[in-house]
Image (tube, coloured by chain):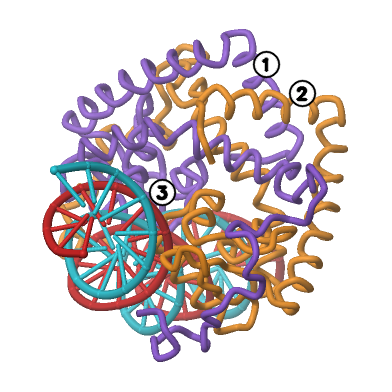
Chain colours: A purple, B orange, C cyan, D red
Amino acid sequence: MRDATAPRPGPAETEPAETGPAEPGPAESGAPERFVDGYLLYLLARASSIASAEFHTRVKERGVPIPVWRILAVLKGTAGVTVGELAARCLANQPTITKTVDRMQAQGLVVRMTDAGDRRRVFVRLTPAGESLVDELIGDARKHQAMLEQAMGVAESRVLVDALQRLIASTGSDC
Amino acid sequence: MRDATAPRPGPAETEPAETGPAEPGPAESGAPERFVDGYLLYLLARASSIASAEFHTRVKERGVPIPVWRILAVLKGTAGVTVGELAARCLANQPTITKTVDRMQAQGLVVRMTDAGDRRRVFVRLTPAGESLVDELIGDARKHQAMLEQAMGVAESRVLVDALQRLIASTGSDC
DNA sequence: ACTGAAATTATGCCTTTTCATGAAATAACA
DNA sequence: TGTTATTTCATGAAAAGGCATAATTTCAGT
Protein backbone atom coordinates (compact mmCIF):
# COMPACT_ATOMS: atom_id res chain seq x y z
CA MET A 1 0.00 0.00 0.00
CA ARG A 2 0.87 3.66 -0.09
CA ASP A 3 2.42 3.19 -3.51
CA ALA A 4 1.89 5.29 -6.58
CA THR A 5 -1.49 3.69 -7.18
CA ALA A 6 -2.83 4.31 -3.70
CA PRO A 7 -5.81 6.65 -3.40
CA ARG A 8 -3.67 9.32 -1.75
CA PRO A 9 -4.23 12.88 -2.92
CA GLY A 10 -0.97 13.16 -4.77
CA PRO A 11 1.49 10.87 -6.46
CA ALA A 12 3.25 10.51 -3.10
CA GLU A 13 6.93 10.60 -3.86
CA THR A 14 8.16 7.27 -2.64
CA GLU A 15 11.76 8.39 -2.47
CA PRO A 16 13.08 10.66 0.21
CA ALA A 17 14.83 13.63 -1.30
CA GLU A 18 17.95 13.01 0.69
CA THR A 19 18.83 9.38 1.27
CA GLY A 20 21.32 10.33 3.94
CA PRO A 21 20.34 10.34 7.60
CA ALA A 22 17.21 8.42 8.47
CA GLU A 23 16.12 11.33 10.65
CA PRO A 24 16.40 14.54 8.65
CA GLY A 25 17.23 17.26 11.13
CA PRO A 26 17.15 21.02 10.75
CA ALA A 27 20.63 21.69 9.45
CA GLU A 28 23.74 21.23 11.53
CA SER A 29 23.79 23.94 14.20
CA GLY A 30 22.96 22.77 17.69
CA ALA A 31 19.63 24.42 18.54
CA PRO A 32 17.83 25.77 15.47
CA GLU A 33 15.11 27.27 17.68
CA ARG A 34 12.00 26.09 15.93
CA PHE A 35 9.12 28.53 15.97
CA VAL A 36 6.72 26.51 18.08
CA ASP A 37 9.22 26.05 20.91
CA GLY A 38 8.88 29.66 21.95
CA TYR A 39 5.29 30.26 20.97
CA LEU A 40 3.12 31.10 23.95
CA LEU A 41 -0.18 29.86 22.52
CA TYR A 42 1.36 26.54 21.61
CA LEU A 43 2.87 26.23 25.06
CA LEU A 44 -0.50 26.93 26.62
CA ALA A 45 -2.29 24.38 24.46
CA ARG A 46 0.40 21.82 25.11
CA ALA A 47 0.41 22.36 28.85
CA SER A 48 -3.36 22.10 28.96
CA SER A 49 -3.41 18.99 26.84
CA ILE A 50 -0.64 17.21 28.69
CA ALA A 51 -1.84 18.12 32.13
CA SER A 52 -5.35 16.95 31.33
CA ALA A 53 -4.41 13.76 29.53
CA GLU A 54 -4.21 11.45 32.52
CA PHE A 55 -7.40 12.63 34.11
CA HIS A 56 -9.31 12.70 30.85
CA THR A 57 -8.34 9.10 30.26
CA ARG A 58 -9.83 8.13 33.58
CA VAL A 59 -13.01 10.07 32.89
CA LYS A 60 -13.42 8.38 29.53
CA GLU A 61 -12.84 5.00 31.16
CA ARG A 62 -15.96 5.69 33.16
CA GLY A 63 -17.80 6.15 29.90
CA VAL A 64 -18.12 9.90 30.28
CA PRO A 65 -17.12 12.00 27.27
CA ILE A 66 -15.08 15.11 28.07
CA PRO A 67 -17.75 17.56 26.84
CA VAL A 68 -20.20 15.91 29.22
CA TRP A 69 -17.73 16.19 32.09
CA ARG A 70 -17.26 19.87 31.30
CA ILE A 71 -20.98 20.55 31.39
CA LEU A 72 -21.44 18.60 34.60
CA ALA A 73 -18.58 20.49 36.26
CA VAL A 74 -19.98 23.86 35.24
CA LEU A 75 -23.46 22.96 36.47
CA LYS A 76 -22.22 21.78 39.87
CA GLY A 77 -23.11 24.25 42.58
CA THR A 78 -25.64 26.14 40.47
CA ALA A 79 -29.41 26.03 40.34
CA GLY A 80 -29.35 25.97 36.56
CA VAL A 81 -27.39 27.61 33.75
CA THR A 82 -28.71 28.75 30.38
CA VAL A 83 -27.57 27.10 27.18
CA GLY A 84 -25.73 30.21 26.10
CA GLU A 85 -23.85 30.53 29.37
CA LEU A 86 -22.98 26.86 29.23
CA ALA A 87 -21.47 27.38 25.81
CA ALA A 88 -19.35 30.26 27.05
CA ARG A 89 -18.18 28.50 30.19
CA CYS A 90 -17.53 25.18 28.45
CA LEU A 91 -15.50 26.84 25.69
CA ALA A 92 -17.85 25.36 23.09
CA ASN A 93 -20.29 26.53 20.45
CA GLN A 94 -23.94 26.85 21.28
CA PRO A 95 -25.24 24.18 18.86
CA THR A 96 -22.70 21.75 20.28
CA ILE A 97 -24.02 22.40 23.77
CA THR A 98 -27.61 21.95 22.63
CA LYS A 99 -26.75 18.54 21.18
CA THR A 100 -24.67 17.41 24.12
CA VAL A 101 -27.44 18.45 26.49
CA ASP A 102 -29.83 16.38 24.36
CA ARG A 103 -27.71 13.31 25.03
CA MET A 104 -27.30 14.11 28.70
CA GLN A 105 -31.02 14.62 29.09
CA ALA A 106 -31.67 11.29 27.41
CA GLN A 107 -29.38 9.70 29.98
CA GLY A 108 -31.17 11.41 32.81
CA LEU A 109 -28.20 13.53 33.89
CA VAL A 110 -29.85 16.93 33.37
CA VAL A 111 -33.23 18.48 32.76
CA ARG A 112 -34.24 21.49 30.73
CA MET A 113 -36.44 24.19 32.26
CA THR A 114 -37.69 27.13 30.28
CA ASP A 115 -37.39 30.40 32.12
CA ALA A 116 -40.79 31.67 33.16
CA GLY A 117 -39.61 35.27 32.95
CA ASP A 118 -38.09 35.01 29.47
CA ARG A 119 -39.35 32.05 27.55
CA ARG A 120 -36.51 32.20 25.05
CA ARG A 121 -34.08 31.08 27.71
CA VAL A 122 -33.65 27.47 28.72
CA PHE A 123 -32.01 26.53 31.98
CA VAL A 124 -30.11 23.29 32.22
CA ARG A 125 -30.01 21.74 35.64
CA LEU A 126 -28.50 18.65 37.20
CA THR A 127 -30.76 15.76 38.15
CA PRO A 128 -29.96 13.74 41.28
CA ALA A 129 -28.26 11.21 39.00
CA GLY A 130 -26.22 13.99 37.46
CA GLU A 131 -25.34 15.31 40.92
CA SER A 132 -24.02 12.00 42.12
CA LEU A 133 -22.04 11.43 38.94
CA VAL A 134 -20.43 14.84 39.05
CA ASP A 135 -19.67 14.45 42.73
CA GLU A 136 -17.69 11.31 42.01
CA LEU A 137 -15.86 12.93 39.13
CA ILE A 138 -15.04 16.03 41.14
CA GLY A 139 -13.62 13.80 43.83
CA ASP A 140 -11.31 12.24 41.28
CA ALA A 141 -10.47 15.66 39.87
CA ARG A 142 -9.44 16.98 43.28
CA LYS A 143 -7.22 13.98 43.87
CA HIS A 144 -5.64 14.41 40.47
CA GLN A 145 -5.07 18.10 41.02
CA ALA A 146 -3.41 17.40 44.36
CA MET A 147 -1.05 15.00 42.65
CA LEU A 148 -0.33 17.52 39.93
CA GLU A 149 0.38 20.27 42.45
CA GLN A 150 2.71 18.05 44.35
CA ALA A 151 4.51 16.99 41.18
CA MET A 152 5.21 20.55 40.09
CA GLY A 153 5.49 22.03 43.55
CA VAL A 154 2.76 23.73 45.50
CA ALA A 155 4.38 27.14 45.31
CA GLU A 156 4.95 26.86 41.59
CA SER A 157 1.39 25.79 41.09
CA ARG A 158 0.20 28.91 42.86
CA VAL A 159 2.41 31.04 40.64
CA LEU A 160 0.92 29.34 37.61
CA VAL A 161 -2.67 29.86 38.70
CA ASP A 162 -1.91 33.49 39.37
CA ALA A 163 -0.31 34.00 35.98
CA LEU A 164 -3.18 32.26 34.21
CA GLN A 165 -5.75 34.42 35.94
CA ARG A 166 -3.78 37.50 35.01
CA LEU A 167 -3.65 36.38 31.41
CA ILE A 168 -7.38 35.79 31.31
CA ALA A 169 -8.03 39.13 32.97
CA SER A 170 -5.76 40.96 30.54
CA THR A 171 -7.77 39.73 27.57
CA GLY A 172 -10.87 41.32 29.04
CA SER A 173 -12.83 38.18 28.30
CA ASP A 174 -16.28 38.02 29.79
CA CYS A 175 -16.48 34.26 30.00
CA MET B 1 -41.50 24.63 19.41
CA ARG B 2 -39.75 23.03 22.30
CA ASP B 3 -43.14 21.97 23.65
CA ALA B 4 -44.14 18.58 24.91
CA THR B 5 -44.37 17.26 21.36
CA ALA B 6 -40.91 18.39 20.31
CA PRO B 7 -38.39 15.68 19.44
CA ARG B 8 -36.32 16.44 22.53
CA PRO B 9 -35.04 13.43 24.43
CA GLY B 10 -37.29 13.92 27.42
CA PRO B 11 -40.66 15.45 28.08
CA ALA B 12 -38.81 18.72 28.74
CA GLU B 13 -40.49 20.24 31.75
CA THR B 14 -41.77 23.53 30.49
CA GLU B 15 -42.14 24.99 33.94
CA PRO B 16 -39.23 26.09 36.03
CA ALA B 17 -39.23 24.47 39.42
CA GLU B 18 -39.03 27.78 41.15
CA THR B 19 -40.95 30.60 39.51
CA GLY B 20 -39.21 33.13 41.68
CA PRO B 21 -36.08 34.92 40.49
CA ALA B 22 -35.48 34.85 36.75
CA GLU B 23 -31.82 34.06 37.43
CA PRO B 24 -31.56 31.18 39.86
CA GLY B 25 -28.37 31.74 41.78
CA PRO B 26 -26.42 29.42 44.04
CA ALA B 27 -28.11 30.09 47.35
CA GLU B 28 -27.72 33.33 49.25
CA SER B 29 -24.14 33.53 50.55
CA GLY B 30 -21.85 35.88 48.66
CA ALA B 31 -19.28 33.58 47.03
CA PRO B 32 -20.31 29.92 46.95
CA GLU B 33 -16.95 28.97 45.41
CA ARG B 34 -18.03 26.80 42.55
CA PHE B 35 -15.76 23.91 41.80
CA VAL B 36 -14.53 25.01 38.40
CA ASP B 37 -13.39 28.41 39.66
CA GLY B 38 -10.44 26.88 41.45
CA TYR B 39 -9.78 23.94 39.16
CA LEU B 40 -6.36 24.12 37.57
CA LEU B 41 -7.16 22.08 34.46
CA TYR B 42 -10.19 24.21 33.75
CA LEU B 43 -8.15 27.36 34.22
CA LEU B 44 -5.54 26.05 31.80
CA ALA B 45 -8.11 25.13 29.17
CA ARG B 46 -9.85 28.45 29.57
CA ALA B 47 -6.65 30.46 29.36
CA SER B 48 -5.58 28.56 26.28
CA SER B 49 -8.95 28.95 24.62
CA ILE B 50 -9.34 32.63 25.38
CA ALA B 51 -5.79 33.56 24.50
CA SER B 52 -6.02 31.74 21.18
CA ALA B 53 -9.48 32.94 20.20
CA GLU B 54 -8.48 36.18 18.49
CA PHE B 55 -5.63 34.72 16.52
CA HIS B 56 -7.55 31.61 15.55
CA THR B 57 -10.30 33.78 14.17
CA ARG B 58 -7.82 35.53 11.94
CA VAL B 59 -6.30 32.26 10.77
CA LYS B 60 -9.72 30.90 9.87
CA GLU B 61 -10.51 34.11 8.01
CA ARG B 62 -7.63 33.23 5.74
CA GLY B 63 -9.36 29.93 5.04
CA VAL B 64 -6.87 27.90 7.07
CA PRO B 65 -8.36 25.45 9.58
CA ILE B 66 -6.65 25.36 12.96
CA PRO B 67 -5.43 21.75 12.60
CA VAL B 68 -3.75 22.77 9.34
CA TRP B 69 -2.11 25.75 11.04
CA ARG B 70 -0.83 23.48 13.79
CA ILE B 71 0.73 21.07 11.33
CA LEU B 72 2.29 23.87 9.32
CA ALA B 73 3.75 25.43 12.46
CA VAL B 74 5.25 22.16 13.62
CA LEU B 75 6.76 21.47 10.21
CA LYS B 76 8.38 24.90 9.97
CA GLY B 77 12.11 24.68 10.42
CA THR B 78 12.29 20.92 9.95
CA ALA B 79 13.28 18.78 6.99
CA GLY B 80 10.27 16.53 7.55
CA VAL B 81 8.40 15.00 10.47
CA THR B 82 6.82 11.57 10.63
CA VAL B 83 3.06 11.17 10.93
CA GLY B 84 3.36 9.81 14.44
CA GLU B 85 5.51 12.68 15.62
CA LEU B 86 3.14 15.13 14.02
CA ALA B 87 0.29 13.61 15.98
CA ALA B 88 2.22 13.94 19.24
CA ARG B 89 3.35 17.49 18.62
CA CYS B 90 -0.02 18.66 17.30
CA LEU B 91 -1.87 17.19 20.28
CA ALA B 92 -4.01 15.13 17.91
CA ASN B 93 -4.73 11.50 17.12
CA GLN B 94 -2.82 9.76 14.41
CA PRO B 95 -5.77 9.06 12.08
CA THR B 96 -6.74 12.70 12.30
CA ILE B 97 -3.26 13.72 11.21
CA THR B 98 -3.30 11.25 8.34
CA LYS B 99 -6.52 12.71 7.02
CA THR B 100 -5.54 16.30 7.54
CA VAL B 101 -2.27 15.63 5.74
CA ASP B 102 -4.33 14.12 2.90
CA ARG B 103 -6.16 17.42 2.51
CA MET B 104 -2.98 19.46 2.82
CA GLN B 105 -1.26 17.33 0.23
CA ALA B 106 -4.20 17.78 -2.12
CA GLN B 107 -3.79 21.52 -1.70
CA GLY B 108 -0.10 21.32 -2.40
CA LEU B 109 1.00 22.47 1.04
CA VAL B 110 2.97 19.34 1.97
CA VAL B 111 4.38 16.19 0.43
CA ARG B 112 4.78 12.69 1.81
CA MET B 113 8.12 10.93 1.58
CA THR B 114 8.58 7.37 2.72
CA ASP B 115 11.72 6.84 4.73
CA ALA B 116 14.25 4.84 2.74
CA GLY B 117 15.70 3.36 5.91
CA ASP B 118 12.40 2.25 7.43
CA ARG B 119 9.64 2.04 4.91
CA ARG B 120 6.91 2.04 7.52
CA ARG B 121 7.65 5.63 8.33
CA VAL B 122 6.33 8.50 6.27
CA PHE B 123 7.84 11.93 6.49
CA VAL B 124 5.67 14.95 5.90
CA ARG B 125 7.45 17.96 4.52
CA LEU B 126 6.49 21.48 3.55
CA THR B 127 6.33 22.39 -0.12
CA PRO B 128 7.38 25.88 -1.23
CA ALA B 129 3.70 26.83 -1.16
CA GLY B 130 3.43 25.49 2.37
CA GLU B 131 6.56 27.37 3.37
CA SER B 132 5.27 30.69 2.15
CA LEU B 133 1.89 30.17 3.78
CA VAL B 134 3.37 29.24 7.13
CA ASP B 135 5.78 32.15 6.94
CA GLU B 136 2.87 34.55 6.62
CA LEU B 137 0.98 32.91 9.45
CA ILE B 138 4.01 32.89 11.71
CA GLY B 139 4.43 36.59 11.04
CA ASP B 140 0.89 37.17 12.23
CA ALA B 141 1.44 34.89 15.19
CA ARG B 142 4.50 36.82 16.31
CA LYS B 143 2.62 40.09 16.09
CA HIS B 144 -0.25 38.65 18.06
CA GLN B 145 2.06 37.28 20.70
CA ALA B 146 3.75 40.66 21.07
CA MET B 147 0.35 42.24 21.65
CA LEU B 148 -0.55 39.58 24.16
CA GLU B 149 2.72 40.00 26.06
CA GLN B 150 2.26 43.71 26.20
CA ALA B 151 -1.33 43.35 27.39
CA MET B 152 -0.40 41.11 30.29
CA GLY B 153 3.01 42.58 30.92
CA VAL B 154 6.29 41.29 29.57
CA ALA B 155 7.56 40.21 32.97
CA GLU B 156 4.36 38.39 33.79
CA SER B 157 4.43 36.67 30.43
CA ARG B 158 7.92 35.38 31.19
CA VAL B 159 6.71 34.08 34.54
CA LEU B 160 3.87 32.31 32.79
CA VAL B 161 6.09 30.69 30.18
CA ASP B 162 8.41 29.53 32.91
CA ALA B 163 5.59 28.04 34.96
CA LEU B 164 4.12 26.30 31.93
CA GLN B 165 7.44 24.75 31.03
CA ARG B 166 7.85 23.57 34.59
CA LEU B 167 4.40 22.04 34.53
CA ILE B 168 5.12 20.22 31.28
CA ALA B 169 8.46 19.02 32.60
CA SER B 170 6.93 17.78 35.84
CA THR B 171 4.56 15.51 33.97
CA GLY B 172 7.50 13.83 32.33
CA SER B 173 5.77 14.00 28.99
CA ASP B 174 7.86 13.05 26.02
CA CYS B 175 5.99 15.12 23.50
C1' DA C 1 -50.72 48.35 19.36
C1' DC C 2 -47.62 47.49 15.41
C1' DT C 3 -43.59 46.80 12.96
C1' DG C 4 -38.85 45.78 12.55
C1' DA C 5 -34.63 44.63 15.08
C1' DA C 6 -32.32 41.85 18.49
C1' DA C 7 -31.69 37.89 21.41
C1' DT C 8 -31.96 32.95 22.43
C1' DT C 9 -32.15 28.25 21.29
C1' DA C 10 -32.98 24.46 17.95
C1' DT C 11 -32.24 22.17 13.33
C1' DG C 12 -30.11 20.46 9.04
C1' DC C 13 -26.48 19.63 6.22
C1' DC C 14 -21.92 18.78 5.62
C1' DT C 15 -17.22 18.21 7.31
C1' DT C 16 -14.28 16.41 10.65
C1' DT C 17 -12.95 13.44 14.37
C1' DT C 18 -12.88 9.16 16.80
C1' DC C 19 -12.56 4.24 17.55
C1' DA C 20 -11.48 0.01 16.09
C1' DT C 21 -9.21 -2.43 12.79
C1' DG C 22 -6.43 -3.65 8.73
C1' DA C 23 -2.01 -3.73 6.05
C1' DA C 24 2.75 -3.43 5.54
C1' DA C 25 7.37 -3.35 7.36
C1' DT C 26 10.62 -4.19 10.88
C1' DA C 27 12.31 -6.39 15.16
C1' DA C 28 12.96 -10.22 18.25
C1' DC C 29 13.89 -14.67 19.00
C1' DA C 30 14.01 -19.54 18.83
C1' DT D 1 15.78 -18.67 8.56
C1' DG D 2 11.10 -18.94 9.95
C1' DT D 3 7.76 -17.33 13.02
C1' DT D 4 5.61 -14.36 16.00
C1' DA D 5 5.46 -9.48 18.04
C1' DT D 6 5.81 -4.86 17.51
C1' DT D 7 5.75 -0.62 15.14
C1' DT D 8 3.85 2.63 11.87
C1' DC D 9 0.51 4.37 8.96
C1' DA D 10 -4.02 4.00 6.42
C1' DT D 11 -9.01 2.93 6.21
C1' DG D 12 -14.01 2.55 7.21
C1' DA D 13 -18.06 3.12 9.81
C1' DA D 14 -20.19 5.73 13.34
C1' DA D 15 -20.29 9.76 16.34
C1' DA D 16 -19.48 14.51 17.04
C1' DG D 17 -18.75 19.20 15.71
C1' DG D 18 -19.26 23.52 12.83
C1' DC D 19 -21.71 26.73 10.09
C1' DA D 20 -25.53 28.78 8.47
C1' DT D 21 -30.21 29.43 9.29
C1' DA D 22 -34.91 28.80 11.11
C1' DA D 23 -38.29 29.47 14.87
C1' DT D 24 -39.68 31.89 19.03
C1' DT D 25 -39.72 35.38 22.10
C1' DT D 26 -38.62 39.91 23.66
C1' DC D 27 -37.36 44.71 22.91
C1' DA D 28 -37.39 49.53 20.74
C1' DG D 29 -39.38 53.06 18.51
C1' DT D 30 -43.09 55.06 16.55
Q: Quadrant of the C terminus of chain B?
A: top right
Q: Which residue is mark 1?
A: A159
On screen, residue A120 versus residue B56, left or right, reads left
Of B118 and B15, which appears nearest the observer?
Answer: B118
Of A51 and B149, which appears nearest the observer?
Answer: A51
Q: Nearer the viewer, mark 1 or mark 3?
A: 1
Q: Which mark is residue A85?
A: none
Residue A104 at what x, y percent from top left?
23, 47
On screen, residue A58 versus residue A3, left or right, reads left
Residue B127: tell me if it is visible: yes
Instruction: Determine whether the residue tagged by mark 2 lies in a helix, strand or loop.
Output: helix
Identified by mark 3, the residue type is Val
Q: Of the two numbered discs 1 and 3 on the same chain, state the one appearing first in sequence.
A: 3
Q: Between marks 1 and 3, how big is the CA–CA gap? A: 33 Å
Does A171 appear above or below B85?
A: above
Of B115 and A125, which appears nearest the observer?
Answer: B115
Q: Which residue is mark 3?
A: A83
Chain letter for the residue marked with disc 3 in the picture: A
Q: Residue at x 47, y 56 (%)?
A: B84
Does A51 appear above or below A15?
A: above
Instruction: Determine whether the residue tagged by mark 1 lies in a helix, strand or loop.
Output: helix
Q: Say whether mark 3 and mark 1 are on the same chain.
A: yes
Does B25 appear above or below B137?
A: above
Q: Say whether mark 2 and mark 1 are on the same chain.
A: no
